[in-house]
Amino acid sequence: MAGCASQLPGFGDDADGSAVTPRPTVTGDADTTVSLTASDGAIRPATDQSTTTWLYEGQFPGPELRVQEGDVLSVELNNDLDAETTIHWHGVPVPNSVDGVPEVTQEPVASSDSFTYTFRAEPAGTYFYHSHVGLQLDRGLLGPLVVEERDPHVEYDYDYVVVFDDYLPGEPTLPSDEGAGGGGMGGGGMGGGMMGDVRPPYEGLLVNGQLPEDPPTFDVTEGDRVRFRFVNASSATVFGVRITGHELNVTHADGRPVDPVAVDSFAFGAGERYDAVVEATNPGSWFVQADALDGDEPPARAVLTYDQLDGVRNPETPSSSGTRLRYEDLRAVTPLDGVDGTPDRTFDLTLSRGRGQSYTWTIDGQAYPDADPLRIHPDEHVRIHMENQSPVVHPMHLHGHFFRVGDAIKDTVMVPGHMGEVTLDFRADNPGRWLFHCHNLYHLDAGMARVIEYVE
C-alpha cells in the first residue's frame, strides 16, 4: 500500500487475506424502540426565514434519543425520501453491520423501504446520528444521541444538549472544478490558491436549529451545576465556543470522561463533541456563542439566562480573551486498553488536495472509493500517523473504535493545516470494514477516506 509501512515482516504477502467475521449485533428484546422517518419537511430557523429540507420525524435537528448505558436500542429507519439513505451512529463502536455506511457495512436503504438498527448503547457519552450517504448530512439529516452514565465521574444537576450546525438552505453540491481554488475554508489566511478550499454558501450558523436572530434559551437557577453537551454536527465548520461570564469545566471529550479542565473556550471540528459543566454563579443573561473559525458568518448564539431575573436584560457578548482548550490538556479518566508500548502495525498517511484542476481530496494521493484499504489483524495495536500537506484543517474520524491521542481518548481529531501532524493509536477489537475519513463532508465526498479492513 502506497505510503503505508508495517512493522510486521511480509505484510504485503497477506494483502489478500481472508476477511474476519464481524461480531454480531444483539438479538434480544430492546429496552428502547424508536421509529425515525426521513422525509421532506419545512424548517424555520428564524421567525422570518423558512425552507424545505430533509428531516427525521419532521424535526431539525432530529429527535434527541436518550438511553441508559448498556440498554439495547432499536431504531427503525423509514425512508420517505426520493433517494437512498442510511443512519450512522457517530462515535458509538457498534457492530459493523449496523454502522450505516453504504457499500461498506450495508446496502443503502431504498426509497419507501426501511431498515432496523439494533445495538447495545455503550459506552456512555454524547454522540449524534446522521445520514452517511453523499451530502445528505448538509440537508438536515442529523440528531443527538445521549447515552447516560450509571455513575458519572462529575456532579451536575441537569444537562442541555447544544447542537451546532451550518445552515445551507439549498441543495448541497461539491464545488465546481472552476471554483476549486477559492478561499474561505481555511480561515486565518489559509484559504485561496489551488491548494486552498472553498466554503459552501452558508446563510448562517445554528444552535439547535436556530439562527442567531431567534436564539434558543437555556434557563438556569443560581447555584446549579449545568452540564452542556456540545455537538459539532456541521458539515464544514470549525467552531470556537464560549459562554459569557462563565468558565467551562470540560469533563468529556467525544463522550469519554476526562479529568475536568477549566477553560474559557474550546475549538472543535465537525464530528467532535465536548461536555462541560458550568457553575451558575453569575446571575444575568449571557450569550452561548460559537464562532466559525474557518468562515465569516455571524456567530451561532443561544442565551443562558437565570430564572431569578426581573425584567428583560440584553445578553452580554463574550470577549475573545482567555484560555482555550488544547488536546494536550485532556487526560482520560480510564486508559484505552491494548495500546501501550510499541505498535504492531503503523500507517504513515499524508492528507492533501488532489493534483490537477478537479476538486479532489486524498489520503496518500488516493481518492476514495478508488483507494487501497488499510488492512489490519485482530487484537493488534495499530498506530496511524498523519501529516497534513494542505493548508486547511481536517477533522479525521474513525468508525467503530476509540483511539488514544496524547492522553485523551477520542474518535475524531483535528489535524492542523500547513504540515500539521497527529498520531493516534487504537486496538483492533471490533472486526469488520470501517471507514476512516475527514468529517468535513465535502472533503469526504471528494475522496478523503479509506476503509480499514480486518483480515487473518
Image (cartoon, rainbow, N blue to C red):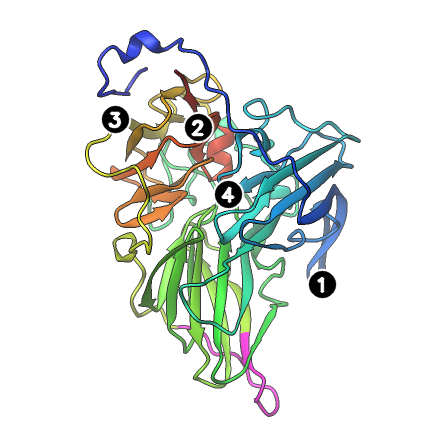
| Badge 2 amino acid | Ala
Identify the mark nearer the N-term, 2 or 1.
Answer: 1
| Badge 1 amino acid | Asp
Identify the mark nearer the N-term, 4 or 1.
Answer: 1
In percent of width and height, residue 50 lies at 72, 55
Residue 303 vs residue 426: left or right? right
Badge 3 local density, few (<14 within 10 Å), some, or many (20+)?
some
| Residue holding disc 3 | 344
At a point 69% along the width and 35% down the height, the residue shown is 116
Label 1 secondary element: loop
| Badge 4 amino acid | Val
Label 4 secondary element: loop
Which circle marks residue 48 in the picture?
1
Residue 164 belongs to magenta span: no
| Closer-to-camera residue (358/333) | 333
- When asked about the image quadrant of residue 39, the answer is top right
Identify the mark nearer the N-term, 4 or 3.
Answer: 4
In percent of width and height, residue 323 lies at 29, 66
| Residue holding disc 4 | 92
- Which range of residues does the magenta coloring cover? 304-318
Mark 4 vs mark 1, CA separation in Å: 37 Å
Label 3 secondary element: loop
Dominant secondary structure of the residues highlighted in magenta in the image: loop
Q: Nearer the viewer, mark 3 or mark 2?
A: 3
Q: Nearer the viewer, mark 4 or mark 1?
A: 4
Which circle marks residue 449 in the picture?
2
